[in-house]
Image: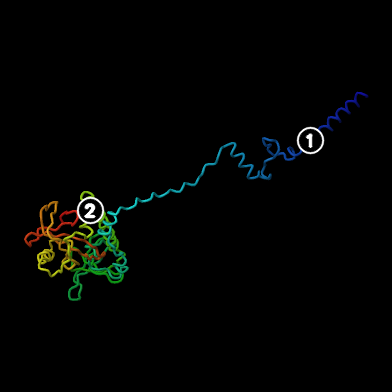
Amino acid sequence: MKGFFATLIVVCLILGGAWFAYEPYLKPLLGKGDGIVTDDASRVIDGSAEKPPASEGKSQSSTTSGPVAKTTPEAKTKPKAAPKSEIDLIIEEKYPMPSIIPLMEIVDNWRNVPPRAFPPEVLAEETVAFQLVVNGQAIGSSNVAPGTPLKPQSLSGDQLLIANAANPGMSTTISVDKTDFKERITGRYNEYVEKVKAEVLAKRARVKQVLEADPSKLAALTGEAPASVTVDPGDPKMRSVKASLAAGDVASVKLEEATSFIWNGTETVGGKFAGNYETVTVRFEVSTIFGTFPVNYKCLLQGGRVIAWIDPITEDPI
């Protein structure tokens, strides 16, 4: 019996020690059966437990995976354009980019398209029925399949009068939006604008090349050549110059577009027409449906007769 009580006392002492150990240390860890013990055995992580403070999260991230990489692309710095030289500025002034009229202004928002802007032909999206009318009576008809070339004649509101290209005597009206009329005019306009800009840039590059090779030509570009003097268009020396322009010797300009005549006296020119000439620089304001463009051409004279027209700086033939 004494042995039984001794054993019971030992068991009670063991259970008491376990209770005291459980209270401060085991309860926080074992109070939730589905919890996960953290590495430092100080917190329980589960669906309802509080998340660690942001500072703690950052600390762990920095120690385990290193610095966080930036995800936003760095702003690209646009390289600064090189400053323009004095020659560049002079060339841009003398060979300016034309101030081209906006297309919607030219066509008055498609309310008044100039006849010169009409394309030579258009295509319709649908079958077009034509009637041949004589003295107010229809004497024949034909259907033209979509995609067949048609000749535009006039635009009134949104109705385009078109003629049968195979039989111009047959015409009818169709909604302009059922044709490629606007697209063709817009395409022609855009092509013209790009062509003009490319020509100006090419001319500037050519002039700069010439001036760098022969800086003495700068005086002619700036109008400071000593022998140059503006003369009256009625001056007898201008008679053959004006006759040449009236005859269409320079296809890109007209006599009435000439704004001034500058007599340069006798000059030595190079290029294709190398030699000594009396020269006249003529300034023009060329008018087109796209805008007004300034241009200068030089006329070469020998014995009062026009020999050729050249560019005043590059001396390339016109």
Depth order, front residue of 16/87: 87
Furthest toward the top, the residue is 3
Measuring from the top left, give residue 298's x and y in whole percent: 16, 59
Observer-nearest residue: 141 or 179?
179
The answer to whether marks 1 and 2 mark residues whose Cβ atoms lie closer than 8 Å is no
Q: What residue is shown with label 2?
A: 207
Q: Amino acid at mark 2?
A: Val
Q: Disc 1 and disc 2: Cα gap in Å?
A: 97 Å
Q: Quadrant of the C terminus?
A: bottom left
Left/right of residue 81 with respect to residue 281 in the rendered view: right
Please identify the residue farthest to the left as the structure is shown: 303
Residue count near mark 2 (Cα–Cα under 10 Å), binned few <14, some 14–19, many ≥20: many
Secondary structure of the residue carrying tag 1 is helix
Q: Earlier in the sequence, mark 1 or mark 2?
A: 1
Q: Using residue 230 as the reference point, say whether residue 187 is left or right of it.
A: right
Q: Which disc, if any, is residue 62?
A: none
Picture coordinates of residue 181, whole percent (x, y): 27, 63
Residue 163 in the image: state x and y as whole percent.
Answer: 21, 67
Vertical order, 262 against 313 (above or below): below
Colour scheme of the picture: rainbow
Q: Quadrant of the N terminus?
A: top right
Identify which amino acid the numbered label 1 is placed on. Answer: Tyr
Label 1 belongs to which residue? 22
